[in-house]
Amino acid sequence: MRSGILTTGNPNGGPKVREFERIFAEFIGVKHAIAVNSGTSALYAALIAAGVGPGDEVIVPSFTFIATANVVLAVGAKPIFADIDLSTYNISVEEIRKKITPRTKAIIPVHLYGLPADMDPIMELAEEHNLVVIEDACQAHGSLYKGRKAGALGHMAAFSFYPSKIITTGEGGMITTNDDELAEKLRRIRTHGQVKGYDSVMFGMNLRMTEINAAIGIAQMKKIESFLQRRRKNALLMTEELSSLDDMIVLPTEPPGYTHNWYVYTIRLTNPSIRNKLQSYLRNEGIGAMVYYPIPLHKLPLYERLGYSKISLPNSELASQSVLSLPVHPLMSEEDVIYVAEKVKEGLRRIS
């Protein structure tokens, strides 16, 4: 505030934006980080930089937040929905393989709930078919896949800093990449395609992050490791407390070689018909149990009108009917976690 620079139209960003970008790039382990004003803008800018447009197809999971598909519509391309692996809730590699056509231009694997998608085979498919891979890492700050950070696995990656995320800037997003040419395009895209100012050389929009948002991000990055450690501790305790319920719920997994950031701790009810009853019970007990996501994208009214409703994606549909996310955020104490677990057990007993 004292600097007097609240934001800037410079395509390279203001001093706080550049500092936040440098810190975040170092954290992810990439050459470039480009700050924007939301995770949606990050995905949108990445698609533009990849040259995705009318006539192109982009493969996306249906079990995710709507932004993943809406940005494809925004650039005039067609989202192609793929089913998920029920054990991870992430896009199925075999499903991707089935959905590739001569019109496919890109794949957007989502690291849902903070668990990375199986990126090595996805990148192999992309190389085989000359496709661009844009990680939707909006929930995956600090997650690891075979020793590498989410956000350093594809050609580009998009992060969100919405208040519920691992760290926040209020509103904000970031694109990460190791590609110098893509990074330069992204900086132009976020400022109306400008290079120096009033010299637009390509299509772009005002997608900039403000200096105020970046300053918050810098402060948050100093705490991210402690946030991640606390989430992991709470998630492991939650798993320990709920392990006796394996006949009624499926606990979240962390496959070998993966490190979950525990953005969301999601259980799945073996009997989907009691999911909503359990959620209501927990919320009445003061517990913020949430459903992410109650309707797969291909079943939402928007995509039904676009002709997607008859697609069969059984795993996505089952997950939407049976998942329930429990809080494990850093403000929770060990006693809070145990309380939530006890209420889950109590709720299941009463409902059953």
Image: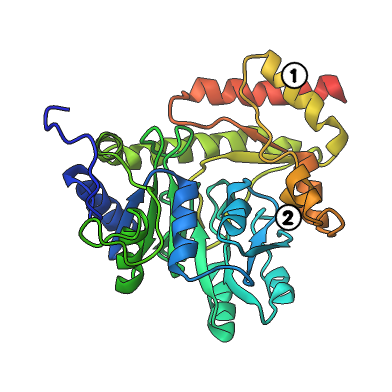
Left or right of 13? Residue 265 is: right
Name which residue type carries label 1: Tyr
Name which residue type carries label 2: Leu
* Mark-to-mark CA distance, 2 and 1: 25 Å
Residue 173, horizontal then vertical, whole percent: 40, 46
Residue 183, horizontal then vertical, whole percent: 32, 65
**Quarter of image, res 301:** top right
Disc 1 is placed on an element classified as: helix
Residue 78, horizontal then vertical, whole percent: 67, 64
Q: Residue at x 72, y 36 (%)?
A: 244
Q: Residues within 10 Å of mark 1 (few under 14, many from 20)?
A: many
Looking at marks 2 and 1 on the same chain, the residue that comes earlier in the sequence is marked by 2
Left or right of 75? Residue 59 is: right
**Quarter of image, res 211:** top left
Residue 21, horizontal then vertical, whole percent: 27, 52
Q: Residue at x 68, y 65 (%)?
A: 92
Q: Which disc is residue 338 wearing? A: none
Which residue is labeled 1 in the image? 281
Disc 2 is placed on an element classified as: loop
